Image: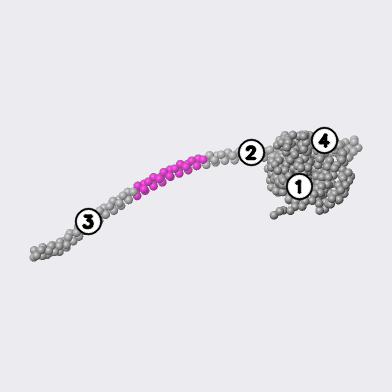
Amino acid sequence: MSGTLIAVVTFLISVAVSLPLGMVIRKKTAESKIKGAESEAARILTNAQKEAENAKKEEVLKAKEEILKSRNELDKEIKERRSEVGLQEKRIIQKEENLERRSEAIERKEKDLERRYQANEERAKDLEYIYEEQTKKLEEISRLSKEEAKVMLLEQLDRKLSDEKALLIRESDSKAKENAAKNAREIIGYAIAKCAADHTSETTVSVVSLPNDDMKGRIIGREGRNIKTLETLTGIDLIIDDTPEAVILSGFDPLRREVAKIALEKLIEDGRIHPAKIEEMVEKAKEEVENIIKQEGERAVLETGVHGLHPDLVKLIGKLKYRTSYGQNVLNHSIEVSNLARIMAEELGLDPKIARRAGLLHDIGKALDHDMEGTHVEIGVDVLRKYKENEIIINAVEAHHGDVEPKTIEAVLVQAADAISASRPGARRETLETYIKRLEKLEEIADSFEGVDKSFAIQAGREVRLIVKPDRISDSQMVILAREVAEKIESEMEYPGQIKVNVIRETRAIEYAK
């Protein structure tokens, strides 16, 4: 135990002695390192100063070299500029010398001209004196004063010039007319060639094919009730003859004839043919025809490129499909007039949009002339004003038959296009139009009587069928009405043979079993 204590004490004494000694040693070591670092730093600083001075000297030398080089280049450029300036000065001096020589020459010419002018003035005075002397002698010889001779010469010259002017005017007018006629023929010929169209005159009959001849009996019905119902509802005469597997629909109104044709085709397809079904199919046929009218109007507008028309006007245009003029389909005629007017307007450098629009709308009144009083031109103008159409278009429509003066060249082109379309070979038939007008007049007379609901001219105008309102016309009044209609037809119309007046009064009582 005592040995261990001695060892510990000995360790502590040695530690106490070694610590101060180590500190002294470390202090001396650090001081020596610091002195070495300071001497090294001084050495580095001295070297850096020397390098900086060397670099500074090098940069100064470089700058001096650059300055010397720039000064040499500047001197060289100055020399070149001085030489150029010297050349320009020489040129300027030469130009000044030339200008001086020219000015001297001009002064000499001016002096020469002044001398000549003075000489001419003196000569002019001499000539004037001679002229006056000669004039006096001529007046003495002719016994006319100067003014009188002047008037006489002017009169003779005026007569001569008048004859020449008249001749020139006649030649110019003749040449202008020839050129105008030639150009007009070329433009119209080009328009007709570019707008070539086939023409088929409208007929007054349609043919409906039958699946077999037994269908004819079903169409006629018991005691003819089916055929009578169909004829009464459509106003079309059904001709069932020996023609195999066909029924002929006869009537002057294409709209009614189309309704009857569609209704009959639907009945044949359905197979059930009786009065109630006939009424249903006729109503459906009317709706289908309305859709066809709308589609045809849209087709015409698209084909002619006319935009922005009111939908009601488009519908009226489509209705022209079922109107004819002297046997010519009015819708096809309107489309052709629109295209012809457009082509001629383009050739003349005018507005093709106005020409095509006016051409398409020029016969719009014919869609309503069955239902309204007045000519188709008056009706068309009223309709276009109702839908706020452009006044230029309205004037072209109003002027296409010469009722008013055309205000634009486009309106004149519509007149020409209408005449061209109507005069094409095979486009129209006068006899068909006369025949249709006679049938229309027949129906107009029948409709003029009070109590008539509908009237139909059938059998090629040999019969007029009147359907009266049963609450307005009694059975006894039917006989009087038939007589009055016949007398009015006799007094107002001319026709071959005789016309049968057939008055029909039908009373129905309808009740539903619930």
Residue 457 visible in rendering: yes
User: Disc 4 designates what residue?
Assistant: 170
In front of the other: label 3 or label 1? 1
Q: Main secondary structure of the magenta part?
A: helix
Q: Depth-wise, is mark 2 or mark 4 nearer the camera? A: 4
**How far apart are labels 1 and 2 at the CA level?**
76 Å
Q: Which residues are magenta?
A: 56-84
Q: Can see residue 338?
A: no
Mark 4: give few (<14), some (14-19) or many (20+) Cα within 10 Å. few
Q: CA distance from mark 2 to mark 4?
A: 58 Å
**Residue position for label 3:** 33
Three-letter amino acid code of the residue under disc 1: Ile
Secondary-structure class at tag 2: helix
Q: Quadrant of residue 465?
A: top right
Along the line of sight, the residue nearer the viewer: 468 or 11: 468
Can you say whether 91 is above or below 309 in the image?
A: above
What separation in Å lies between label 1 and label 4 (alpha carbons)?
38 Å
What colour-coding does the image apply?
one colour
- From the image, tell me which residue sits under label 1: 394
Q: Check residue 102 in the rendering and tell me which mark sits there, or answer none.
A: 2
Q: Residue at x 21, y 58 (%)?
A: 30
Residue toward you, 295 or 185: 295
Quarter of the picture holding the C terminus: bottom right
Q: Position of residue 81 (x, y in %)?
A: 50, 42
Asked whether residue 68 is drawn in magenta, I would say yes
